[in-house]
Image (cartoon, rainbow, N blue to C red):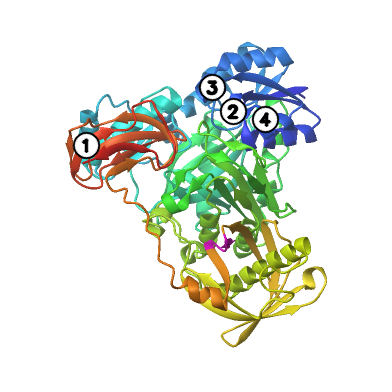
Amino acid sequence: MFKKILIANRGEIACRIARTARKMGIKTVAVYSDADKYGRHVKACDEAIYIGPSPAAESYLVMEKLLSACRQTGADAVHPGYGFLSERTQFAQALADEGIAFIGPNAPVVKLMGDKILANRAAKEAGVPTVPGHWDQIPSAEDCVAIAQGIGFPIMMKAAAGGGGKGIRIARDEAELKDAFRLATSEARSAFGDDRVFIEKFIEQPRHIEIQVLGDKHGNVIHLDERECSIQRRHQKVIEEAPSPFLDGATRREMGMRAVGLAKACGYDSAGTVEFIVDQRRNFFFLEMNTRLQVEHSVTEFTHNIDLVEWMIRIAAGEELTIRQEDVQPHGWSVEARVYAEDPNRKFMPSTGRLVRYREPVESEDVRIDSGVYEGGEISMFYDPMISKVTTWGRDRDSAIALMRRALDEFYINGVHHNIAFLTALMANPRFLQGRLSTAFIAEEYPDGFAPALLEPQDLDSIVAVSVLMHLRYLHRAKDVSGQMPGYGRKLPPGWVAMIAKKYYPVLVEEHAGRGSEEGFDIVRDGHTLSIRSDWVVGEPVLRCTINGQPHSFKVERVGIGYRLYHLGAEVDVIVYTKEVAELAKMMPERKPPDMSKYLVSPMPGLLQSLAVEPGERVDSGDELAIVQAMKMENILRAAQAGKVCKLHAKAGDTLSVGQIILEFE
């Protein structure tokens, strides 16, 4: 067995690998860039080596720096995690040349499956169904149009060396295809150093279902059933689950058999994933094979009681698989949600900044949190925006989802925008609960982006009760500090008004004396009583309570003179007034935001890659104005209306903040 493993990665996956290595008694080495000097993964390992500036191209992607770190520390093995160099053939080969074990499959299979064109050919030869397409390099946009016409629109363009959703574009006509070719090749060059792309037929309403395989160096290969990964945005997975609510037993067995056949045919010897596109008739087609650990491996670990990282290490050390296919007996249901630093209310634009407050849900046998961040740490623009992963397990799908909703309601992040409210709303989406999924699910269910759900009457009651409790607790704290209730003498008035979304909800309040979780209030609204009890204290970001005996969890924070509550996918601002002040508040004029229609502003933090216009140039609605690169993705900004450019406020190469003006129209 290895004595010391260098983890050639960062963030949550580096922490995850370190956890298993520690369990196995193996020392670990972290590597870090300038941005990660104080990273959580650095502290999770026994040693740490600095490898360069923040951009990945100057640190985590520089093979010689990682090889040098191995020599300095005496590491006899390297686990690449996912992303970065995990599927780079040259890295696996360079380690082999140094006598250092690569904890992953052998270099030839990494090369074969890392080239999506060759991988599709190999799959076809192994008897795996493949999507109709063109698997040779496409030299130009004109050639691309001719090929697409032969296959038939819509088509999907993909980077030959791609992965992780990078370098993928969908085109439904020739006009979209030319933009898609330009952006896909540019993204592929930037992310993988290889601008080759290929085309395949885009299957409408597909599901993304993958099979986890595990093979050793002795010819044994098994599969650990499937994961459903259809809930995606911009080809990035958001929600994953195991098993799939769609597959029947026959299709599951067939997909597993085909995946094992492909793995055996190419000599696969590690953990890996064969990904499929599945149509509405359960016909499945090869998508790609990922020769690495997947982000969503945790759902398989929950449903199979297996540590995939441990088996990757054991296989790399030459051990034989002790699990046979007949031993594989999945149990229960598991769901994973990816917490991203992005703003769902602004079409999921990425967000950067410091984690001013960061509280994870409590872990248990059925709730697992994988993260690589900490309170006070920073989410930078240099790496993927994933903050954490939450994985839950239940006896069935409904119980796993219900547990996920509770866990997300207790996950508190302040300092950057995040998608927790969106994830919680997904868990309550009727179509999701019915299992009617496709890779277009988010685009179809939230075509204009995400906005907090409308409050149902029962939610409104609970939000009124919680906001009144918070306000009165704040007043009680002021009394404890100063000895008096500000503005109210010794006793609070019984009448209060909660303002939610510009509507006013009057209530009568009676304090209920108690201890701990029995302390609270009886709140009368519209003739019915809400008995709220909680031991919440001012300053805590998570408020747990019972309302009429039913348990609830809210994320809460003070915003100005009011409160912001997060619950079941809703983000609600509330102000609590006395009756007299509420009457005055109704007469206050509404402040209107400034008119920004004559400016093009950056919708996200990122790099201004290019400008397509000059001062004095006229543009029509839909014309390209600029490209902003953020979190490894390129985003075209287009004109919302016709006009004339009068001034440029930024130039190509500038680093932009959210809302920064790029150019101005007359």
Residue depicted at x 64% and y 13%: 68
Alpha-carbon span between mark 1 and mark 4:
44 Å
Callout 4 touching callout 2 (CB < 8 Å)? no
Left or right: residue 39 versus residue 4 is left
Closer to the chain start, of discs 1 and 4, is 4
The residue that mark 1 highlights is 645
Callout 1 touching callout 4 (CB < 8 Å)? no
Alpha-carbon span between mark 4 and mark 3:
20 Å
Q: Is residue 288 above or below residue 194?
A: below
Callout 3 touching callout 1 (CB < 8 Å)? no
Give the residues drawn in magenta, as a range.
561-572
The N terminus lies in quadrant: top right
The C terminus lies in quadrant: top left
Kind of residue at badge 2: Ala
* Residue 61: numbered disc: 3
The one nearer the camera, 478 or 523, is: 478
Within the magenta stretch, is there residue 138? Answer: no
The residue that mark 2 highlights is 35
Left or right: residue 273 versus residue 511 is left
Q: Quadrant of residue 416?
A: top right
Kind of residue at badge 4: Tyr
